[in-house]
Image (tube, rainbow, N blue to C red):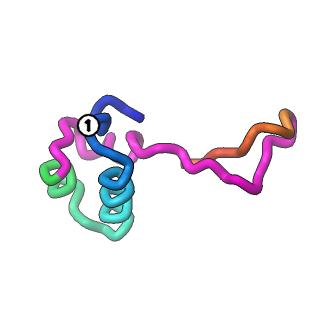
Amino acid sequence: MRKAIAHLDSDQVENLMQKYYDGEKISDLLREYQIVAPASALVSFFPLFVHQDLFCPYCESVNMVSK
C-alpha cells in the first residue's frame, strides 16, 4: 500500500474506494481521509485486486491481479 494511504486501515481503504467509484469528488475524499497527494494520483494508491480463480498462464501457480 502506498505511503499516502498507509494511515488508513483496510475498512477505511475499502470505504474510500467505494466512495471514489460511486463518483464522490476526489478533493472531498482527500480531505475526509487526510490524504496528502494530487487528486490525479488517488486511484494509483488503491491496492490491486487478486483474482482467486485466475492464474498466470506462464507461472500457473500465481494468481492474476488487476487494478
**Looking at the image, which residue sits at the far bottom?**
22
Residue at screen point 37% across, 64% down: 18
Q: Considering only vertical position in the picture, is 60 above or below 18?
A: above
Q: Which residue is mark 1?
A: 7
Residue located 62% across and 48% down the image: 50
Position of residue 51 relative to residue 41, above or below, is below
Q: Is residue 65 left or right of residue 58?
A: left
**Residue 56 vs residue 44, the one in the foreground:** 56
Q: Amino acid at mark 1?
A: His
User: Nearest the camera: 30 or 39?
Assistant: 30
Could you tell me which secondary element the residue under label 1 belongs to? loop
Left or right position of 62 against 42: right
Q: How far across and down, in percent of the image, does residue 43 sit? A: 38, 47
Residue displayed at 32% across by 60% down:
15
The image quarter containing residue 58 is top right
Q: Position of residue 47 (x, y in %)?
A: 47, 44
The segment highlighted magenta reads: 33-58
Total marks placed: 1
Q: Is residue 16 left or right of residue 62?
A: left
Label 1: few (<14), some or many (≥20) within 10 Å? Answer: some
Q: Residue at x 86, y 39 (%)?
A: 60
Is 24 in the magenta? no
For the N terminus, the quadrant is top left
